[in-house]
Amino acid sequence: MYNFQTTTPKTVNNFEFELPPHLEASEPPEARGLQRDQVKLMVSHYGSDCIAHTQFRKIGCHLSAGDLLVINCSGTLNAALEARRADGTRLELHLSTHLPANLWSVELREPGENGTTPFYTALAGESLCLPGNGRVTLHTPHNSQHRSGSKQVRLWIASLQLPLPVHDYLAAFGFPIRYSYVNQAWPAAYYQTVFANELGSAEMPSAGRAFTTELITQLVAKGVQIAPLILHTGVASLEDHEPPYEEYYRVPAATAALVNRAQQQGKRIIAVGTTVIRALETVTDENKTTHAGSGWTDLLITPQRSIRSANGLLTGLHEPHATHFAMLQALTGRQHIKLTYQTALAHEYLWHEFGDLHLILP
């Protein structure tokens, strides 16, 4: 029996459960002899608490003509770089978000036997060597670090001095960000979704990974509508003690119009990923009208603020303490998420970007 309990509600409500190591997807499904769309899919209805289990390629059986899928078309950067301090210490630099004035929010991590861990002893003003005669200069802790009250600095505001345009440089010298549960390095193609058409995410918007061109064609033929937006994801999910940091988003006018029409017609609006919820909620007002817009959002969605733009969500399975749980509870209520995670554990669903998926419907 898995130990699963809820904590006392706070601004960000979270769940406490132990994730067994064998449920952490350590490699892409392709390495397990599966195609992308053959991962498992749990379908849950928060209105009735009904739960079904299927394969992702059969998602169309749970969608209807007129349903609107809102997708994130952000592509994944090779956002990790080898870095070296002046004293020779070897680190890993993770680029998180490209900010105005050509600055970046970045994270330094220390390589170890079991992956990398945050490196907290860097100094403001420090410059580190990067491959190919590149450099990164740390200017100041990210403002989210000040707001957290922590003396440990995980994110920095930094500038890059590179011999090539940044995307060309990362293509030549970077590699995908990889955490300890992934057992080996995988080529960048494994970290791209079929929707990706604009590079910018530090980590893959993984809710869209299981879609294939053939599956999308089937859904469109069925009458399911698809609306694109951009949200460039930063580095890994925040824990519940960390305030949000900004991510760049862009919601086109055509997408806003499709969302509004679906709202008016009482259709299901299904966000493909928590990134899509964050972007849509940033531009949706209290009257549930979604507007076109672009910029940087640091919106944190909690049960104290209802979700206005969507009534469905396709998402992966999230780790305990992640702020994503607050968003899930804002959509479904606390008990439904507790029930579905108990079910996912019991049915041995796989977690993380190469894992299984959860379709949440009204």
Image: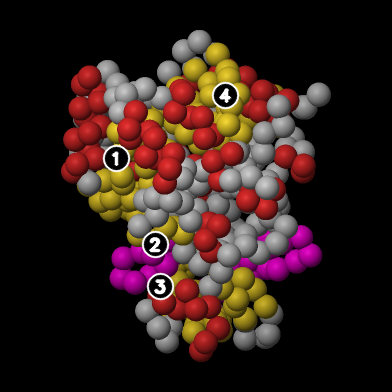
Q: Amino acid at mark 2?
A: Leu
The residue labelled by disc 1 is 227
Judge the density around disc 2: few (<14), some (14-19), many (≥20) Cα neighbours within 10 Å: some
Element under disc 2: strand
The residue labelled by disc 2 is 199
Find residue 184 and report its image quarter. bottom right
Q: Which badge, 1 or 4, comes first in the chain's sequence?
A: 1
Element under disc 1: strand
Residue in view at x 22 percent, y 19 percent: 265
Spatial distance from mark 1 to mark 3, Cα to Cα? 26 Å
Q: Amino acid at mark 4?
A: Ile
Residue furthest to the bottom: 133
Q: Which badge, 1 or 2, comes first in the chain's sequence?
A: 2
Numbered tag placed on residue 337 in the rendering: 4
Q: Which badge, 1 or 3, comes first in the chain's sequence?
A: 3
Position of residue 164 in the picture relative to residue 82 (left or right): left
Compared with residue 6, is residue 274 higher up or lower down, i.e. above or below? below
Element under disc 4: helix
Span colored in magenta: 97-124
Query: Tags 4 and 2 in contact by the CB under 8 Å rule?
Result: no
